[in-house]
Image (tube, rainbow, N blue to C red):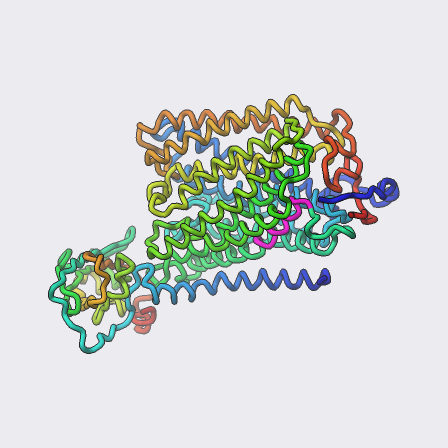
């Protein structure tokens, strides 16, 4: 794909005067893309454990039928907050963190195009996260009507709804600013010779993701603003009493919500597209088809939203359209999966931890993809709708999908970030614990859903008891296994075997031409890409 | 290549336009519902029945009436009959009974919905208590009339239609005379 001239070996010694600041102010006022990337990643990791703790409360309650630990209102707050935190507070910031760290280094740019904006888009997040979490301590508790916030139920929330909506506004604003920054960086700051079709896949997927973010996050902002005015200022966008229609909210929400799932998964595709070639010792198979498949997925994602609402009473023609267009997404996605498989075909494979996570991603994401195709079929969706089957489906694409890609990416680039190799043995143990427990956690939920167990309810009929117990055991093993990840990362930051500039066995990409750890400033003089 | 400033401006404009588009979805959706009958919406003002509609005496359709109250609504509310058999093309009368259970005046608004949605555009109400808001004195109860016709173009596969009303308390202050009709 790209050939790189190494003409900047000396550049990392020339900038001692522009090193990192000291103490807290380094992090508060930094405009350095690597610092900001680190901040994003640390924030995401903290949120992973907050959201994860909520998930464990849910699974603890569901371990046995009946009510054991929490009351139903708190249970509903947990399901809603778990989703909001994980989607807006964890997985999206994590990928923006990767983008900040890696995109400038991958395209040979010295920094992001709008560094001050970059600082701002990060520092909005802790405030937004705090506001969102603070709703749990308010009168009436946090949002409890699901992360989808469907009216009319959500309009019966207490005053804390206003805080939750404001937090969503802030989180959305942060993502939009981040997206603008990424697009401008990619469009304007590529090294000479780095044409669009020579960019690494990770950069491509993020470029397309950033456009999706700008397209749909403002629509969500509009939708939740209407909720706000309906709840507090007497408008009737969604209130039937005043001539509104609650189903309209579902259309607005999913017009955002479906592209949102690709906003989460496309950067994961990007990371996987970096990891698999590196450990197959082959260039990515079908590079340009990967680019077009990504663009195709992004386009299709914008016209399929109503498959989330087959049961609202759509006309037959509508169900047909959304069913067909949804199933069409399987084609570009399959192109990607086959390309990854073909990249591994006859490659000189080795299975270090990042590769293990990437291969697990391939298998387990495909399971989530298949159950997605099942639910795309409108007539059978009526059985799956709002059951644990959908819970199993989207957790398969989000946890062993997006989260595994993020963890794999972290292992992949940790030596580049810290200058030390992580503990490979512990990494492998972390992988196997995660990969086994994630299946114990989510696979039984398919059975529960098909048998008719509804989601978002703290109690269930006794026939569901066995698989729920299995699922909860998996949840606790998976949750606590992630503490190992923190230990491995901390250990790697503190020390370990020195990493070489290449880290891995001759991987492709500009980021592997700078020393490890990557100096505070890289590519002050653009590299030449042929 | 677009300059950095130019690109940023374009992207910001794009974001603002999409924010506007979110609100634009409200009238678009409303229009789509009116055209297609999605959401079971029926006419909100008096329907004009075109002249020369033939009564289809060979066909019987069941029309069911449903009265819905949301949680804690201070009404008694029910249909006079739960269902009737009708011929398409003919006008029928029925009524719903409502009673104010509180000790003060209330203004109510009924919101109709027709299921299945595909039948909604063939369901014409020539008189309906849902066209205006309804004022109830304390503890007052009364029948409220509906007159409707189902046109003979109703698709063949529909043999059962449900007309449901949800009866809401309006937010407007009770003593202002304008409030009684302002939100219909």
**Farthest residue in the bottom direction?**
B51
* Image location (x, y in percent) of residue A170: 57, 52
The answer to whether residue A222 is left or right of residue A12 is left
The residue located at (44%, 61%) in the rendering is A233
The answer to whether residue B162 is left or right of residue A249 is left
- Nearer to me, A23 or A193: A193
* Image location (x, y in percent) of residue A380: 34, 43
Name the quadrant containing residue A114.
bottom right
- Nearer to me, A414 or A372: A372
The answer to whether residue B46 is left or right of residue A354 is left
The answer to whether residue B64 is visible is yes
Name the quadrant containing residue A28.
top right
The residue located at (71%, 63%) in the rendering is B2
Name the quadrant containing residue A14.
top right
- Quadrant of image for the N terminus of chain A: top right
Magenta segment boundaries in residue numbering:
A200-213
A436 above or below B64? above
Q: Is residue A360 magenta?
A: no
A15 above or below A70? below
B54 above or below B160? below
Q: How many marks?
A: 0
- Nearer to me, A496 or A332: A332
The residue located at (54%, 27%) in the rendering is A434
* Image location (x, y in percent) of residue A265: 55, 43
- Nearer to me, A258 or A64: A258
Q: Is residue A201 magenta?
A: yes
Q: Main secondary structure of the magenta part?
A: helix
**Farthest residue in the left direction?**
B57
B126 above or below B95? below
* Image location (x, y in percent) of residue A175: 60, 51
The answer to whether residue B129 is visible is no
């Amino acid at each position: 794909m790209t050939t790189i001239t190494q003409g900047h070996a000396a550049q990392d010694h020339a900038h001692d005067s522009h090193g990192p600041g000291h103490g807290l102010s380094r992090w508060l006022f930094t405009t350095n893309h690597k610092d900001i990337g680190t901040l994003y990643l640390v924030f995401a990791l903290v949120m992973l454990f907050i959201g994860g703790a909520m998930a464990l409360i849910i699974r603890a309650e569901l371990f046995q039928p009946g009510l054991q630990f929490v009351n139903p209102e708190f249970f509903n707050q947990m399901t809603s907050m778990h989703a909001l935190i994980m989607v807006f507070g964890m997985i999206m910031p994590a990928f923006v963190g990767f983008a900040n760290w890696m995109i400038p280094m991958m395209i040979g740019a010295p920094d992001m195009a709008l560094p001050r904006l970059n600082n701002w888009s990060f520092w909005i997040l802790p405030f937004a996260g705090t506001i969102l979490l603070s709703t749990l301590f308010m009168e009436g508790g946090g949002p409890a009507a699901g992360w989808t916030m469907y009216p009319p139920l959500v309009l019966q929330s207490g005053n804390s709804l206003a805080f939750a909506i404001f937090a969503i506004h802030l989180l959305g604003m942060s993502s939009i600013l981040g997206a603008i920054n990424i697009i401008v960086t990619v469009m304007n700051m590529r090294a000479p010779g780095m044409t669009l079709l020579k960019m690494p896949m990770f950069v491509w997927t993020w470029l397309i993701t950033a456009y999706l973010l700008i397209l749909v996050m403002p629509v969500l902002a509009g939708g939740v603003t209407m909720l706000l005015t309906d709840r507090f200022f007497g408008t009737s966008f969604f209130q039937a009493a005043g001539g509104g229609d609650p189903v309209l909210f579902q259309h607005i929400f999913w017009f955002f919500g479906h592209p949102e799932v690709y906003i989460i998964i496309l950067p994961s595709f990007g990371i996987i597209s970096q990891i698999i070639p590196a450990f197959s010792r082959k260039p990515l198979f079908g590079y340009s088809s990967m680019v077009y498949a990504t663009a195709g997925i992004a386009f299709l994602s914008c016209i399929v939203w109503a498959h989330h609402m087959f049961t609202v009473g759509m006309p037959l023609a509508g169900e047909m359209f959304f069913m067909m267009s949804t199933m069409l997404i399987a084609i570009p996605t399959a192109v990607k999966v086959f390309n990854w498989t073909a990249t591994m075909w006859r490659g000189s494979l080795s299975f270090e931890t990042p590769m293990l996570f990437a291969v697990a991603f391939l298998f387990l994401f495909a399971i989530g993809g298949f159950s997605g195709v099942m639910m795309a079929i409108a007539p059978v969706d009526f059985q799956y709708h709002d059951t644990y089957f959908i819970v199993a489906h989207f957790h398969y694409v989000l946890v062993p999908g997006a989260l595994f890609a993020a963890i794999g990416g972290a292992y992949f680039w940790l030596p580049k970030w810290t200058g030390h190799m992580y503990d490979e043995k512990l990494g492998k143990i972390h992988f196997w614990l995660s990969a086994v427990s994630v299946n114990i956690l989510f696979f039984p939920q398919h059975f529960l859903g098909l048998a008719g167990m509804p989601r978002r309810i703290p109690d269930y009929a006794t026939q569901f008891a066995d698989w729920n117990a299995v699922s909860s055991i998996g949840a606790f093993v998976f949750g606590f296994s992630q503490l190992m990840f923190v230990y491995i990362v901390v250990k790697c930051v503190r020390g370990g075997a020195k990493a070489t500039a290449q880290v891995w066995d001759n991987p492709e990409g500009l980021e592997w031409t700078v020393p490890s750890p990557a100096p505070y400033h890289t590519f002050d003089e653009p590299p030449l890409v042929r | 290549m677009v300059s950095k400033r130019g690109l940023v401006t374009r992207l910001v404009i794009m974001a603002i336009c999409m924010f506007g588009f979110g609100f634009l979805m409200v009238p678009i959706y409303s229009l789509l519902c009116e055209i297609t009958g999605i959401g079971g919406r029926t006419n909100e003002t008096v329907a004009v029945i075109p002249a020369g509609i033939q009564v289809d005496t060979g066909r019987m359709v069941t029309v069911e009436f449903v009265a819905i109250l949301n949680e804690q609504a201070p009404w008694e509310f029910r249909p006079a009959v739960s269902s009737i058999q009708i011929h398409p093309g003919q006008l029928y009368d029925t009524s719903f009974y409502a009673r104010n259970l509180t000790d003060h005046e209330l203004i109510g608004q009924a919101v109709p919905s027709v299921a299945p949605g595909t039948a909604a555009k063939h369901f014409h109400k020539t008189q309906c208590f849902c066209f205006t808001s309804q004022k109830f004195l304390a503890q007052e109860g009364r029948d409220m009339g509906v007159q409707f016709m189902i046109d003979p173009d109703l698709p063949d596969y529909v043999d059962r239609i449900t007309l449901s009303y949800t009866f809401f308390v309006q937010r407007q202050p009770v003593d202002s005379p304008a409030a009684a009709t302002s939100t219909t």
